[in-house]
Amino acid sequence: MSSSKQIDLKDLVPIMKEQLDQGKTVSFVPSGKSMKPMLDDGKDMIILKKPKNKLRIHDVALYYRAEDSKYVVHRVVGFEKNGSYIMRGDNNIMKEHNIPMSDVIGVVTAYYHKGKMREVDHPLYRIYCDFWFYTCPIRAVWRRIKPRR
């Protein structure tokens, strides 16, 4: 008989940071629906590395969100004048502003979706990123006008 215990991400972050600082990668299964359809809640796994440089548009990062003391996996969608990031989940409409680099834990290099590994430097992944980035305004309008069930 096998039992598994779910561990809160905040308890794992110190270990993850230590491993990332040593140049290793870490992986975990994130929960939540903000990165759908890229990641299914509690089913898909992401692989992180420590960013060597400033994050780029479309990078997906694990970061600490100070306003509610949570760790979040979202995508870079812009930059503030002060150099901080603007982030948004693929399934979200609202942006999060002023995420400093110091709050970034790691950047996604690959992920498993429905059991298949996908690397973020693959050309099809870049097309996916562009599609979700540029269709956000359309999705925002659609959410306002579609009938509620």
Image: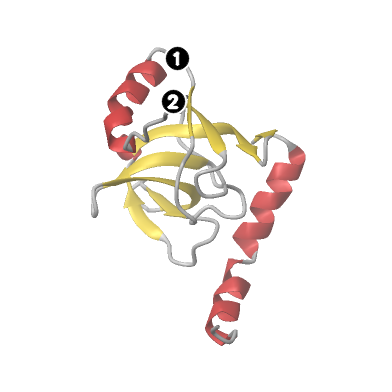
Question: Secondary structure beneath disc 1?
Answer: loop
Quadrant where the C terminus sits is bottom right
| Residue 87 position in % (x across, y down) | 44, 53
Residue at the (46%, 25%) spot, across then down? 2
Residue at the (29%, 47%) spot, across then down? 70
In the image, 127 versus 31, the foreground residue is 31
- For the residues labelled 2 and 1, the Cα–Cα distance comes to 7 Å
Say which label, 2 or 1, has the lower sequence index.
1
Q: Image quarter for residue 86?
A: bottom left
Question: Secondary structure beneath disc 2?
Answer: loop
Give the farthest residue toward the top: 22
In the image, 11 versus 131, the foreground residue is 11
The colour style of the image is secondary structure
Would residue 16 be found to the left or right of residue 52 on screen? left
| Residue 44 position in % (x across, y down) | 57, 40
Tell me if mark 1 has few (under 14), some (14-19) or many (20+) residues whose alpha carbon lies within 10 angstroms of its own.
Answer: few
Instruction: Say if mark 2 contacts mark 1, CB within 8 Å.
Output: yes
Q: Is residue 26 above or below residue 38?
A: above
| Residue 14 position in % (x across, y down) | 28, 25
Q: Amino acid at mark 1?
A: Gly
Q: Which label belongs to residue 50?
A: 2
| Residue 107 position in % (x across, y down) | 48, 34
Q: Amino acid at mark 2?
A: Lys
Q: Which label belongs to residue 139?
A: none
Which residue is the site of mark 1? Answer: 23
Total numbered labels: 2
Would residue 6 be found to the left or right of residue 138 on screen? left
Residue at the (44%, 25%) spot, across then down? 50
Residue at the (49%, 37%) spot, across then down? 29
